[in-house]
């Protein structure tokens, strides 16, 4: 059993939303990328055929009639394993493809850049309605239907639904860590090259993967501070390692030294350890429903304790990037519990879902496509004008969210 309790040695806790995958994120290279002909004839209906044990869906990301589009070859598949194979011919506005069930990210590939010929993810699906989500496409959400008998709450029982939720969340965490491994390697490569601008960009791209699953990282008391300790929390005589001393080099000093390169190498090493440890948690089915609930609430505490105050990203001013990732990580924990919570307390569940929508809508107002990480820099001016508003927004979500741990623990 793991603990998602906030760390006692620092004023912050967890963190940040859209990395690899969930549910059976076995990355598969099978299937071929969608072609222009497939895209032109797509959405013609019909179910995908099964090959290599999985239904195969080719997704073409390309310009259609002058607009960036995301076009699946089929819009339905039989229940069971489904592999989505993605290619981006020339659509610069679309950089990721996700499969959603309600608000849950079941499978995802990011960095779907123009010229990318083939990446894939595989998920195991039961009958029902899903959505293919391609942010930036002319049509971002597209319905996707899976045919076959869907498991019912009555047949499974609430306890079984909670077990499905924790198993799904475990795969979500593993997917985020897989993406963090790649992002940390890209950060080290940029730092080793001596390119400060490229390193700043790589730093901004790596942070969300860690922040989304920080409640899990916090369960390893030595590893989390080695990766994410802020300078104010460094004990006298203790070496300061991880993201934030590197952040200081890149954004305050704007210089890369031998120490910077050592810090980047240390991040890669510690992230590899995190991958090993989280894989063990998944294998051993160590996640508990109440821990997911506490982690979801703890992420909001992290937002209020360090993101809104501007303490987390003191040098880069990327606090809103972390803020958004905290919210996404919190929502994913909630979404994996949601099927059971609908059986336990449908009214509360609906209230929380509505509050997440409100928070996410408000966050959209801070997006900036030209800024590092896709959000406005959290300057002193922005903090002064908006901190109180953001605090009230988070509190209105945290209040009902804090009630769910007890509810799932007593099932």
Image: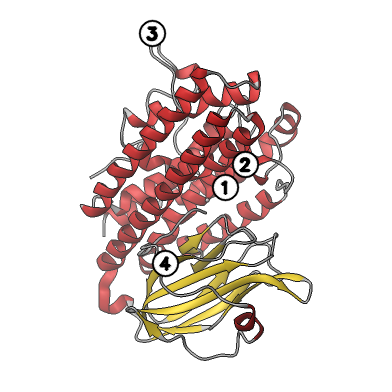
Q: Which residue is mark 4?
A: 29
**Vertical side of 258 occupied by 213: above or below:** below
Is the residue marked by circle 3 packed among few (<14), some (14-19), or many (20+) residues within 10 Å?
Answer: few
Q: Which residue is mark 2?
A: 392
For the residues carrying marks 1 and 3, which lies nearer the camera in this image?
3
Is the residue marked by circle 2 packed among few (<14), some (14-19), or many (20+) residues within 10 Å?
Answer: few
Q: Secondary structure at mark 1?
A: helix
| Chain-order first, disc 4 or disc 2 | 4
* Numbered circle sitting on residue 237: 3
Distance between the alpha carbons at the discs numbered 2 and 1: 6 Å
Could you tell me which residue is drawn at 64 percent across and 67 percent down? 89
Distance between the alpha carbons at the discs numbered 1 and 4: 43 Å
Could you tell me which residue is drawn at 50 percent across and 68 percent down? 99
Q: Secondary structure at mark 4?
A: loop
Question: Which quadrant of the figure contains the C terminus?
Answer: bottom left
Residue 111, image quadrant: bottom right
Distance between the alpha carbons at the discs numbered 2 and 3: 38 Å
Q: Which residue is mark 1?
A: 396
């Amino acid at each position: 059993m793991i603990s998602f309790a906030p760390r006692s040695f620092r004023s912050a806790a967890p963190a940040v939303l859209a990395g690899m995958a969930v549910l059976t994120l076995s990355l598969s290279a099978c299937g071929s990328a969608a072609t222009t002909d497939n895209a032109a004839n797509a959405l013609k209906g019909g179910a995908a055929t099964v090959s290599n044990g999985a239904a195969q869906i080719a997704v073409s990301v390309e310009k259609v009639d002058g607009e960036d589009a995301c076009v699946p070859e089929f819009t339905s598949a039989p229940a069971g394993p489904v592999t989505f194979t993605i290619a981006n011919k020339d659509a610069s506005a679309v950089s990721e493809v996700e499969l959603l069930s309600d608000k849950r990210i079941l499978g995802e590939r990011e960095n779907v850049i123009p010229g990318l010929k083939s990446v894939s993810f595989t998920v195991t699906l039961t009958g029902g309605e899903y959505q293919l989500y391609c942010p930036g496409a002319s049509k971002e959400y597209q319905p996707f239907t899976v045919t076959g008998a869907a498991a019912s709450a009555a047949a499974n029982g609430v306890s079984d639904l909670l077990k499905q939720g924790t198993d799904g969340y475990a795969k979500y965490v593993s997917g985020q860590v897989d993406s963090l491994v790649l992002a940390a390697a890209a950060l080290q490569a940029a730092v080793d090259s001596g390119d400060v601008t490229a390193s700043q960009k790589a730093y901004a791209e790596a942070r969300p993967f860690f922040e989304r699953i920080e409640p899990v990282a916090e369960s390893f008391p030595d590893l989390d501070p080695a990766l994410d300790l802020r300078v104010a929390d460094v004990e006298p005589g203790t070496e300061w390692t991880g993201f934030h001393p590197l952040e200081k080099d890149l954004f305050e000093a704007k210089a890369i030294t031998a120490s910077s390169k050592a810090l980047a190498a240390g991040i890669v090493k510690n992230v590899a350890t995190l991958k090993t440890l989280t894989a063990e948690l998944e294998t051993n089915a160590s996640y508990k429903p109440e821990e997911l609930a506490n982690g979801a609430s703890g992420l909001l505490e992290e937002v209020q304790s360090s993101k809104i105050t501007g303490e987390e990203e003191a040098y880069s001013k990327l606090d809103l990037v972390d803020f958004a990732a905290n919210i996404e990580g919190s929502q994913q924990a909630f979404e994996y519990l949601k099927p059971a919570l609908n059986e336990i307390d449908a009214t509360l569940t609906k209230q929380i879902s509505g509050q997440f929508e409100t928070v996410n809508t408000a966050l959209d107002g801070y997006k900036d496509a030209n800024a590092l990480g896709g959000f406005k820099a959290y300057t002193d001016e922005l903090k002064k004008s908006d901190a109180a508003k953001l605090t009230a927004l988070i509190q209105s979500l945290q209040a009902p969210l804090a009630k769910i741990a007890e509810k799932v623990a007593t099932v």
